[in-house]
Amino acid sequence: MVYEWEWISELIIIIYGLSVIGYFIDFIQINQKANKIAFWLLSIAWFLQTIYFIKHLFIEFTFPVATLIDSLFFFSWILITFSLIINRLFTIHFIVLFVNLFGFFVLLLYFVADLKQQPIQRTIEFAHEMLIAHISLAFVSYGFFTLSFIFSIMYLIQYRLLKRKKGLKWLWRIGNLSQLESYSFKAITLGIPLLLLSIILGLFWTNVAGVDFYWYDIKILGSLLVLVIYIGFLVLRGINSYRGKTLATYNIAAFLILLINFLLSNSYSNFHF
């Protein structure tokens, strides 16, 4: 099994997750730099998976489809291969993003299924690492949402000052409206994929750790609600009629919902404990 090299599985997850974030940024912002970084990260993940694939073929003399678990790994490898080819030959951002997101999900399924065949100590260690990654990603995403909230507050302050013709002397300190709106948008663009990955890792953690899982748990429902609300921000921004003050107000309301969810979920949910 591949987990003679335990650290490789964790490295692949990290690299693959960063690649998904890069493709998400490119999908939302049409950012060629993000696309290139995501492509090379995905190439590294593909290379690491290929090492395992070659190990099966030429060292163990087996093709990794003999069991359902191995088939999941092979399927994720196929998806990454297709994604790399599509990324180089075509400009289809939607397909590349969702193929990679699905491939990441399949790869996690493989890791979780394979872990259940490993010694119990290894399973406990990996579950603990996955929990730490899940919580860390959630807080980093909250950090980006907080930055976005601050930029939106600054936007409304600057907007009000300009309306009263008092904004010119403060312009260089606060920043112009287009900059503030752009920074707010970019922070949310980073926060959303991080929160999504956090939720995915959290769900897989419940499976690995054997934690009782209930969809109606306030922490789970609240996290999904926050994700949907911030995705709504991107959808509204994609509609040309929604810009400026409207989006800034929406973003502030979204952050207040995030705060309420954080306080309530930690008070009334024992999901992580």
Image: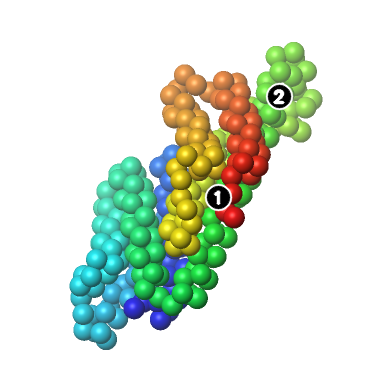
Q: Give amino acid for label 1.
A: Phe
Residue 63, given in percent of the width and then of the height, sits at: 20, 75
Circle number at residue 62: none
First in sequence, mark 2 or 1: give its number.
2
The colour scheme applied to this rendered structure is rainbow
Circle number at residue 158: 2
The front one of 27 and 64 is 64
Residue at 57% x, 60% y: name it. Answer: 132
Q: Give amino acid for label 2.
A: Gln
Res. 269 image quadrant: top right
Q: Which residue is mark 1?
A: 271
Residue 178, given in percent of the width and then of the height, sits at: 60, 29
The front one of 67 and 156 is 67
Label 1's element?
loop
Residue 263, given in percent of the width and then of the height, sits at: 66, 39
Q: Compared to 9, does 262 lie above or below?
A: above
User: Does the rendering let one see residue 63?
Assistant: yes
Question: In what quadrant of the picture does the N terminus appear?
Answer: bottom left
Q: Residues within 10 Å of mark 1 (few under 14, many from 20)?
A: some
Question: In what quadrant of the picture does the C terminus appear?
Answer: bottom right
Residue at 46% x, 60% y: name it. Answer: 210
Residue 231, given in percent of the width and then of the height, sits at: 47, 35
Residue at 55% x, 65% y: name it. Answer: 128
* Relative to 125, 146 lies left or right: right
Q: Residues within 10 Å of mark 2 (few under 14, many from 20)?
A: many
* Spatial separation of the CA atoms under disc 2 and disc 1: 41 Å
Of all residues, the one furthest to the front in this rendering is 212
Residue at 47% x, 30% y: name it. Answer: 232
The front one of 118 and 79 is 118
Label 2's element?
helix
Q: How many marks?
A: 2
